[in-house]
Image (spheres, rainbow, N blue to C red):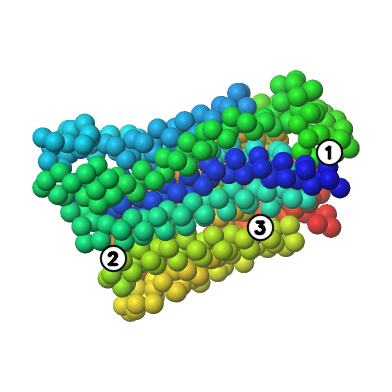
Amino acid sequence: MKTKNFNSNYLLGISFVSTIGGFLFGYDTAVISGCNSFLEQHFELSASMLGWVVSSALLGTIFGCIVAGSITDKIGRKKALILAALCLTVSAIGSMLPPQFLGNIENAYWLTSDVDTAFNVLIIVRIIGGIGVGITSVVAPIYISELSLPKSRGRMVSLYQLSITLGILLAFLIDWLVLTNAGDGAGVIATESSGFFQWLFVDEIWRGMFGTEIPIALLFLILLLVVPETPRWLISKGRYDEAEAIMVKTNGQEYAQKQMAEIKAEVKAKDIGIGELLKPFLRVPLLIGVLLPMFAHLSGIAAIMYFAPNIINESIESVESSFLGAVLVGVVNSAFTFVAIFNIEKFGRRKLLLIGVVGAFISLTGVGVLFAIGSQYVIIPLLLYVASFAFSLGPIVWVIISEIFPTRIRGFAVSIGSFALMTTGFFITLTNPILIEKIMPSGTFFVYAAMTLPAIWFIWKFVPETKGKTLEEIQKYWRDNRLVKNKH
């Protein structure tokens, strides 16, 4: 019994380390929502330029997803995560310290430049951070799924989404605390020198908000140095002894011996490489791996997380209250992710997805209606949407795309799915300020609601139930189409 508990705790510990990348993803997503109004003011941004600075990180995630598949399959899951952590650390520091272009430049706290150069530096470092997020979004779910037992894999991979939601919640909370501490001086550029921390956390408050990400990125980088590589990747490279030692430590001797044989047989199959992804028996999983992530972001979740205070402020017209509303969004997002974690192995992936997407359609329609009639209660259906997303599309997309592909091409296949998700998120975020300006908030949310309808049909028609199956059993299903008929 002691061995079982030890193994369980060890696996939980290394899964926790890998999910810090998701935490940084969420933190970076939300922390800029507090910076938006100050960035808009200091850089004198138009709606389209605000959309660009916010979505630039998502552009980076697209590049990250493109390279992640080949990187993780070639150098391993662990080294790929270390590379991602380096990108995230550079971005966190760089986002806080673009050249200074306002205030008393003769007695500047940092390197100085014109506003355009400072803006371009900010864009570049946010793209670098996005590359780190893109790599993490592909590799972390794979890493966790390849180390987990079938009976707990859905729950363990859902921890990745939970870490994203907790990162979002903490960022909203930190933004609110920084804003509250700054008081009426927030964003007001002092004409005289008033101290370095005054400059960071009051005068140019967006710098301090960005800077709070630095210790988390450094922690991620340091902890990754002590986690193991996944046994499945080691076996694919012929490193059997290392793989078996890790499997014994995480899941016990009996499981290790059984799985070693299965994984070796699967890895040695003739149809290996990227070309396998285009074979007829994998057409449906490829379709799922691309469309399911797209549907997740077409519902508008990225725009809501990146612009939460701005959207809420459209209905209540109070900056401080809108920041508090954003904190509430973060609380609901985290709380309902636990619904998925505790129920995904009970009810399965498919049922939670269907319930959540139907709930998203109803609540997004409600947001549009309340905006149209000028109600101050928009936040109620908005929170219902966040809750619906949090227990369905949010975590379950990562679970499904990390388990439906063969081991030898899993990295490449998941990178395609993550690429689809990030690309969709980029365009949704880039266009949100423009849509709100052109067709008003009500029209924007009616568009998001309409985009959830195809998802309901697609999930009902194509997504099978995979709970309780080993990764090798799921691969077998795509060859003989028996999984849907299974008792699970």
**Which mark is first along the chain, 2 or 1?**
1
Residue 268 position (above or below residue 95): above
**Which mark is first along the chain, 2 or 3?**
2
Q: Looking at the image, which residue is at 78% across and 23% down?
A: 240
Residue hosting label 2: 319
> Furthest residue to the top?
238
Q: Amino acid at mark 1?
A: Gly
Q: Answer few, some or many: residues within 10 Å of disc 3's Cα (few below 14, many 20 plus, some between 14 and 19).
A: many
Lateral position of residue 149 relative to residue 307, left or right: right
Q: Are marks 3 and 2 in contact (CB under 8 Å)?
A: no
Q: Amino acid at mark 3?
A: Ile
Q: Looking at the image, which residue is at 84% across and 58% down?
A: 487
Nearer to us in this view, 304 or 9: 9
SS at badge 3: helix
Residue hosting label 1: 252
> CA separation, marks 3 and 2?
34 Å
Residue hosting label 3: 341
Lateral position of residue 328 relative to residue 75, left or right: left
Res 282 quadrant in image: top right
Q: Amino acid at mark 2?
A: Val
How far across and how far down the image is residue 173, in percent?
42, 58
Lateral position of residue 407 relative to residue 136, left or right: right
SS at badge 1: loop
Q: Answer few, some or many: residues within 10 Å of disc 2's Cα (few below 14, many 20 plus, some between 14 and 19).
A: some
Res 9 quadrant in image: top right
SS at badge 2: helix
Closer to the observer: label 3 or label 2? 2
| Residue 62 seen anywhere in this rendered image of the structure | no
How far across and how far down the image is residue 292, in percent?
57, 51
Res 12 quadrant in image: top right
